[in-house]
Image: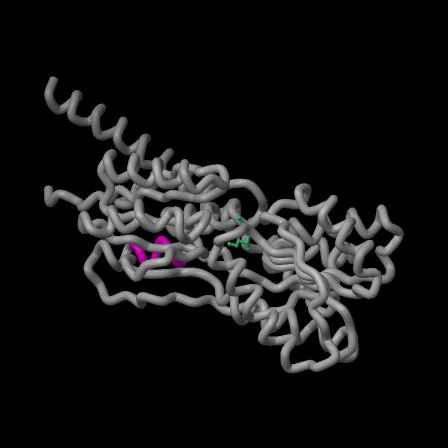
Amino acid sequence: PAAHPSYRIGFSQCSTGGTWRKAVLAGMERELSFHPEMHLRMLDAHDNSQRQQAQIRELVRGGIDLLIVSPQEAGPVTPAVEEAFQRGIPVVLLDRRITSEQYTAFVGGNNLEVGQTAARYAARLLKEHGHVLEILGGVNASTTANRHLGFAQGLAAFPNMHLVAQVNGNWDSVALQPLLATALKAHPEVSIIFAHNDEMGLGAARVLRQLGLRKKVRIIGVDGLEPGLVQQRALTASLLYPPAGEDAIRTAAKILAHQPFKRENILGTMVIDSTNAMTMRQQIDKMVSQQRDIERQQGLMQHLLATYATQQTALYVSLAS
Ligand code: FRU
């Protein structure tokens, strides 16, 4: 029989914590179920760029046909990615970027658009007059830089919207809390917070509650995968940031099959607020249940194949005897 091609995909993931990263992996698995020839090996850098460099080198040493990488920080992770690329291994960047052009394709959201849309939404909520505080994501992450840039550009269109304070949140809901409390005391005029992800938005909600400011200050987050947070009013709104796991695998499959592919695969965003949170939640629930159906069908298929194999063996045995 003709040999079927088999591909080893190395996936260097900066972190596997949180809803968004889990959704990336779920999307990859969904798409991989249509590609039995592709085998994924993921290493989790636990938010550490040094570890991520070492893990990229480990994946390369172990032998891979393609590397998917979501870099913790752009600068520090770049050398290891360039090494892989220079060895002829195609590289697909997911969500965050490196500082060099040595990659094969990018898949991820439009962070400038995320920032701009958040700014416009904030201006609309506050009737174009207000003081804003921004909670930044991780330092040196391309997504942090672009979300901020888009946000600042967006606010610039409204002369009475003022960005008065920033807090480093590092994508996490806990670290920001004392910093935010201090910043809010120094800036009691703040009436809206733009948090670079929903997790930090939730941390901010906790601080606001403690300071008795929950009614006065609104929060806009990013990721949008938990519309329930908006329905329960923990967040006023969230900007959907598509996890791009499926797109990463689809792009990888095209590259490996030497088919034409797009180098820049930029996914759009949309505002999730009280007007559409319920619809979004139903969509997400539907997707999860469809995923379960796919898994059940795969299980059934494997069962059938195993039964078929046993029957064939039985047949050969009876023919041979
Ligand atoms: C998860 C995450 C998401 C965010 C993305 C930005 O690690 O922080 O919440 O949207 O990374 O790179």
The chief SS type of the magenta part is helix
- Please report the bounds of the magenta region as a residue range: 247-252
- Residue 107 can be seen in this image: yes
Q: Is residue 268 left or right of residue 226?
A: left
Q: Is residue 270 left or right of residue 181?
A: left
Count of numbered tags = 0
Q: Is residue 320 left or right of residue 171?
A: left
Q: Where is residue 305 drawn, in percent x and y? A: 31, 36
Residue 94 lies, with reference to residue 49, above or below; the image says below
Q: Where is residue 307 drawn, in percent x and y? A: 32, 31
Residue lying at 39% horizontally and 47% vertically, measured from the top left: 76
Q: How is the image coloured?
A: one colour
Q: Where is residue 224 drawn, in percent x and y? A: 62, 58
Quarter occupied by residue 14:
top left
Quadrant where the image shows the N terminus = top left
Q: Where is residue 42 drawn, in percent x and y? A: 38, 39
